[in-house]
Image (spheres, rainbow, N blue to C red):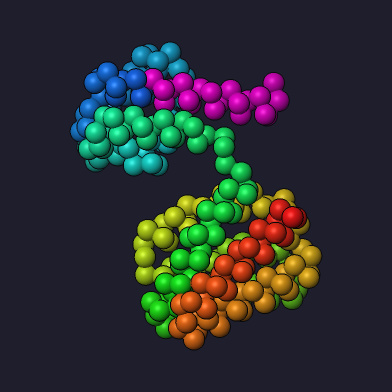
């Protein structure tokens, strides 16, 4: 069995566990505030391996549907059963549907918002961090080095400066996905790095000028150009 077949089997196993947990919620077997059975008990109930059960529980915790409390174990969050069931259905449908175009489209919304807020909310120390990240990217580009991680550190510096913890959290969640999706993409073309650096500079200039509209526009142009470069359209 090759790696693709293994991934498909693993995904189907996790989906099966999520579907059975969803059925428990609908039937009232699990309610808000209830402590979850042990992984071993879930394995017995669902006829699934512990690995599939553990992964399904990790996904539920990642999306905030369950939480682990000290000395109490994992409990169901206080969300109504119908809402919980709907969210689990969405999680099931999400699995395996993420693609680079969709991720970049969503990322653009967050990045524009972060840049606009950073222009008016960033502290002097945070602006210094943005400038340092920009400098590090520029130096790597000049040396024809790998700029992928440094590019995203620049964007994270802006997100940390926007004064909105939710925006920062969402950008932080998406960043590893984008880096992984772009890891094998050729980032060593000097002309591409030069264009990216120029676009970064426009964003920096707008933030330094405390011009939120210019910062949003500069980030929008950068996101669109990044999309075109990545998808080669």
Residue 11 in magenta stretch? yes
**Image quadrant assignment for residue 47:** top left
Estimate the x, y position of residue 7 in percent, counting from the top left.
61, 29
Residue sitting at x 79%, y 65%: 189
Residue 134 can be seen, yes or no: no
From the viewer's perspective, is 22 left or right of 109? Answer: left
Residue 78 vertical placement versus 48 (above, below): below
Residue 86's spot in the image, x, y percent? 36, 32
Q: Going by the image, does 3 lie left or right of 90? A: right
Image position, residue 83 (x, y; %): 30, 34
Above or below, 90 against 215 in this view is: above
Range drawn in magenta: 1-20
Looking at the figure, which quarter contains the C terminus? Answer: bottom right
| 142 sits to left or right of 80 | right
Q: Nearer the viewer, residue 202 or 13?
A: 202
Front-most of residues 225 and 3: 225
Q: Position of residue 191 (x, y in %)?
A: 78, 70
Residue shown at the point (42%, 61%) measured from the top left = 168
Would you say the magenta stretch is mainly helix, strand or loop?
Answer: helix
Q: Residue at x 53, y 56 (%)?
A: 107
Splitting the image into 4 quarters, where does residue 6 fall? top right
- As displayed, is residue 188 above or below residue 30? below
Q: Residue at x 58, y 63 (%)?
A: 152
Q: Is residue 132 magenta?
A: no
Q: Is residue 177 visible?
A: yes
């Amino acid at each position: 069995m090759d790696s693709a077949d293994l991934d498909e089997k693993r995904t189907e196993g996790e989906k099966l566990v999520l579907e059975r947990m969803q059925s428990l919620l609908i039937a009232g077997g699990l309610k808000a505030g209830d402590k979850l059975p042990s992984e071993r008990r879930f394995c017995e109930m669902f006829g699934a391996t512990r690995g599939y059960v553990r992964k399904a529980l990790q996904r539920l915790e990642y999306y905030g549907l369950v939480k682990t409390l000290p000395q109490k174990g994992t409990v169901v969050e206080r969300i109504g059963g119908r809402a919980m069931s709907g969210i689990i259905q969405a999680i099931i449908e999400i699995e395996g549907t993420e693609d680079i175009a969709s991720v970049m489209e969503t990322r653009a919304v967050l990045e524009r918002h972060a840049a606009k807020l950073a222009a008016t909310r960033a502290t002097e120390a945070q602006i210094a961090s943005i400038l340092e990240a920009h400098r590090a990217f520029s130096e790597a580009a000049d040396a024809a080095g790998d700029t992928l991680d440094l590019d995203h550190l620049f964007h994270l510096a802006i997100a940390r400066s926007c004064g909105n913890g939710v925006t920062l959290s969402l950008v932080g969640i998406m960043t590893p996905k984008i880096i992984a999706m772009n890891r094998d993409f050729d980032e060593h073309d000097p002309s591409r790095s030069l264009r990216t650096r120029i676009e970064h500079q426009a964003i920096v200039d707008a933030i330094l000028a405390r011009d939120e509209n210019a910062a949003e526009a500069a980030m929008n142009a950068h996101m669109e150009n990044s999309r075109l470069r990545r998808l080669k359209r």
